[in-house]
Image (cartoon, rainbow, N blue to C red):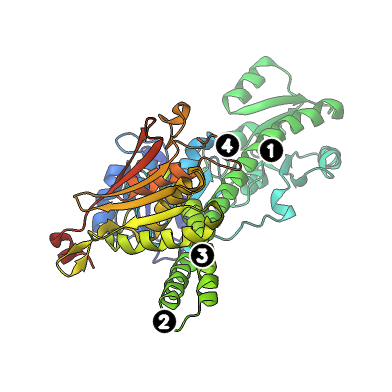
Amino acid sequence: MPITKSTIILVVDDFESMRKVTSSQLETLGAAAKNILQAKDGAEALRILQNHLVDIVITDWNMPVMTGLDLLIAMRANAKLSQLPVLMITAEAERARVEQAISYGVSGLLVKPYTPGALLDRIERAMTWRPRKVDVIESGIEPAIDAPVSLSKETVRSTILVVDDTPDNLHLISQLFKDEYRVRIAHSGEKALEICTSNNPPDIVLLDIMMPGIDGFEVAKRMREHPNSENIPVIFVTAMTDQDAKLKGMELGAVDFVTKPIDPTALIPRVRNFMRFVELRKQLQADYDGMLEMARLKEDVEHITRHDLKGPLAGVIGLIQAMEEDDSTSRKQFEQLRLVEETALQLLNMINLSSELFKIETGRFKLDAQPVKISDILRRIVEVSRTTYNEKHLTISVDTDITVVGDEPLQILGDSMFCYSLFQNLVKNACEAAPEKTRVIVSLVDEDPVQIKIQNKGAVPAAIRNSFFERFVTQGKSGGTGLGTYSARLLAEAQNGHISLDVSDEDNLTIVTVSLPRLLEVDANVVV
């Protein structure tokens, strides 16, 4: 989406001079001065955003009072501002901090120093992307989606500007670098300034000092006064060798001096050394663009998993269960349906583990609590488990007789798909740990909170009792990952519940108890 006269842009930076520079660049890119708003920090920006409609926010990273990152977090947590594109300008090179900005849904990152062309490109990308509407809580939000960036060979190739009033010098230097870099030439200081202050400036300037008209010192001085050229490295290539000339050049921001007559063996490595720095900055921008793309691709995959697969899969499970309860279903069909149901439940569990646990672990999950008929879920899981563990000759029972409150079955307030995964993992764990020809008992206790107990013969080894619900904790189970009980704990806590372990060495028993919020009458009146 290009910038137009009607585009309203908010520029946030604690330095007034930088706000003016950015605003001037935006005007040259097509924005109207009256539609460029300015704020000195994130707090002032938020106040402006509450009272003005804005198309995009361009913010610096490090600012007093409220940083650019804090501004981004506040915007993504605000329903009114959560979809507003945010372009963050930064010299930040710490990968972890950049990943943090991406995780909070930044629309684009622009690395300092940058050209107006790079600014326009990042603005257009940011304005064509809109984050999906996601649940935002204190610790973060989902990342976003955008199309991969395609850099042409011409864009990647760095540019050298050679400035000299002597054609032979221009030809010599051009020939030295033409195979490695894109080389432009200027016969005068005026032409050099025109190129350097354009929207497509060079990456480095090899600048003669003694020229008619505007000399090299004046060119360097004016370059430092213009936002498009102020950060371009300058190497003076000159016949002047006195110390005063070198000091003056250094004061004007020169990075090196090369004396004439030109020695190619000395000039080439010097230029290459500074070009490496230029290319590292370009690579940093490319890395940030790539990080954004990967984060947005990840969200796209998670969105497909979470919505496009999970919803239909839940519907399939419901249809299977309805067919199992149909009186016309034969015994053979019933057994086949049970196998299909077990497979569907396992797939649902995998989806929950892959797409939801990470959000829970990082504090990004927000529960949409709904009434759940927990007795139905426990009964289904137990029935499927009987078929699965038939060869162990286990007796797997479920006690849900006390599930009646008036005419309604006992319900908890949570997430039905989470409950499937939670109790499937716990019942599976109990059945795997139980010796052959023993009992696994699932019982439901009508309390507030509701208590669900899974009991099996076989005591959990003492060595892992204190860490039973931690990640990767397992013992004595072939192929065990140690994620079943860990995920059960996270899924219980995500539903505002609790999980605990009781072990009796004397009776050789293990009891896992899950406490989940009971649906009360007041809850039933407000839950949709």
185 sits to left or right of 365: right
The residue carrying mark 4 is 231
**Rendered location of residue 85, percent (x, y):** 42, 57
Q: Which label's residue is closer to the chain start, 4 or 1?
A: 1
Q: Residue at x 53, y 40 (%)?
A: 112
Q: Residue at x 39, y 38 (%)?
A: 509
The reply to whether dot 4 and dot 2 touch (C-beta < 8 Å) is: no
Q: Would residue 294 be visible to someone looking at this image?
A: yes
The reply to whether dot 2 and dot 1 touch (C-beta < 8 Å) is: no
The reply to whether dot 2 and dot 3 touch (C-beta < 8 Å) is: no
- In the depicted view, which residue is nearer to us: 44 or 445? 445
Q: Which label's residue is closer to the chain start, 2 or 1?
A: 1
Quadrant (top left/top right/bottom left/bottom right) for the C terminus: bottom left
The reply to whether dot 3 and dot 1 touch (C-beta < 8 Å) is: no
138 sits to left or right of 457: left
The amino acid marked with disc number 3 is Ala
Q: Residues within 10 Å of mark 3 (few under 14, many from 20)?
A: some
- Give the vertical position of 240 relative to 298 (above or below): above
The amino acid marked with disc number 1 is Val
The residue carrying mark 2 is 327
387 sits to left or right of 489: right
The residue carrying mark 3 is 344
- In the depicted view, which residue is nearer to us: 519 or 186? 519
Q: Which label's residue is closer to the chain start, 3 or 1?
A: 1
Q: Residue at x 36, y 59 (%)?
A: 378
Q: Which label's residue is closer to the chain start, 4 or 3?
A: 4
**Rendered location of residue 204, percent (x, y):** 68, 38
Q: Residue at x 54, y 68 (%)?
A: 340
Label 2 and label 1: CA atoms lie apart by: 85 Å
Comparing marks 2 and 3, which lies closer to the viewer?
Answer: 2
The amino acid marked with disc number 4 is Asn
